[in-house]
C-alpha cells in the first residue's frame, strides 16, 4: 500500500512538472507568435513584434523596468479587448471597445530581463456576454 501511494505521488509530481514546463512560469501556454530573442537587452528603449493580426510593444526605462505595454488588433473589425501578460504573470485587460479605434496602453511597472516574453491576445465580445479569442497569442521576446 505504501508503494502505491509513493508511486501515485511520484506520478502526480512528474505530471505537474511536465505541465509547468509546458505552460511556462506564467501559467500561459506558449505563444502562437513570438519574436526571436533580442541580441541583448538594452534598457531605455522599446521592443515590438507584429504577429498575424496583433502587434505588441513593451517600453523599458533606463532601469530596465517595463513601464508601458501596447497592443493593437489588426484583424477584421470586432468589439472586444486586449489581454496582456508578462514574465510576472497577468498585467490586465483593456476595456471593451471597437478594435478600429487603434491602440491601448497599460502600465505594468514590472522588472524585466533578457529572454522575457511580453504578450497580448485579443478577445472578441460575443452577443451572449461571453468572449472568443481571435488570432493567437503574440509576444515580444526581450
Image (tube, rainbow, N blue to C red):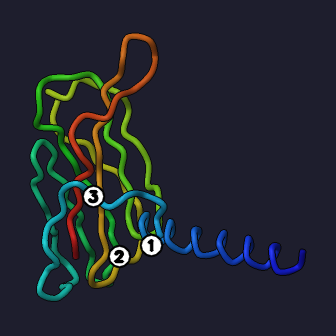
Q: Which corner quadrant of the image does residue 47 belong to?
A: bottom left
Q: Which residue is mark 3?
A: 31
Task: Report whether 51 appears left or right of 129.
Answer: left
Spatial distance from mark 2 to mark 1, Cα to Cα? 26 Å
- Residue found 26% across the figure and 42% down from its top: 104
Discs 3, 1 touching: Cβ within 8 Å: no
Helix, strand or loop status at disc 1: helix
Q: Which mark is residue 29?
A: none
Front residue of 120/62: it is: 120
Of pointers 2 and 3, the one earlier in the residue sequence: 3
Spatial distance from mark 2 to mark 3, Cα to Cα? 22 Å
Helix, strand or loop status at disc 2: strand
- Residue found 30% across the figure and 64% down from its top: 118
Spatial distance from mark 3 to mark 1, Cα to Cα? 14 Å
| Place of residue 62 in the rendered image (x, y in percent of width and height, measured from the top left) | 26, 82
- Residue found 30% across the figure and 27% down from its top: 124
| Place of residue 72 in the rendered image (x, y in percent of width and height, measured from the top left) | 18, 42
Of pointers 2 and 1, the one earlier in the residue sequence: 1
- Residue found 27% across the figure and 76% down from its top: 61
| Place of residue 120 in the rendered image (x, y in percent of width and height, measured from the top left) | 29, 51
Label 1: few (<14), some (14–19) or many (≥20) C-alpha neighbours in 10 Å: few
In this picture, is 131 found above or below 88?
A: above
Q: Which mark is residue 21?
A: 1
Q: Which residue is mark 2?
A: 65
Amino acid at each position: 500500500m505504501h508503494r502505491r501511494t509513493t508511486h501515485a505521488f511520484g506520478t502526480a509530481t512528474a505530471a505537474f512538472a511536465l505541465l509547468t514546463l509546458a505552460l511556462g512560469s506564467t501559467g500561459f501556454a506558449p505563444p502562437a507568435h513570438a519574436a526571436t530573442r533580442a541580441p541583448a537587452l538594452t534598457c531605455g528603449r522599446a521592443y515590438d513584434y507584429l504577429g498575424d493580426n496583433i502587434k505588441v510593444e513593451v517600453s523599458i526605462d533606463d532601469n530596465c523596468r517595463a513601464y508601458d505595454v501596447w497592443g493593437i488588433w489588426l484583424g477584421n473589425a470586432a468589439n472586444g479587448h486586449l489581454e496582456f501578460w508578462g514574465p510576472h504573470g497577468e498585467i490586465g485587460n483593456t476595456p471593451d471597445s471597437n478594435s478600429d479605434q487603434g491602440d491601448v496602453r497599460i502600465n505594468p511597472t514590472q522588472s524585466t530581463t533578457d529572454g522575457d516574453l511580453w504578450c497580448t491576445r485579443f478577445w472578441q465580445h460575443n452577443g451572449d456576454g461571453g468572449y472568443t479569442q481571435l488570432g493567437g497569442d503574440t509576444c515580444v521576446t526581450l
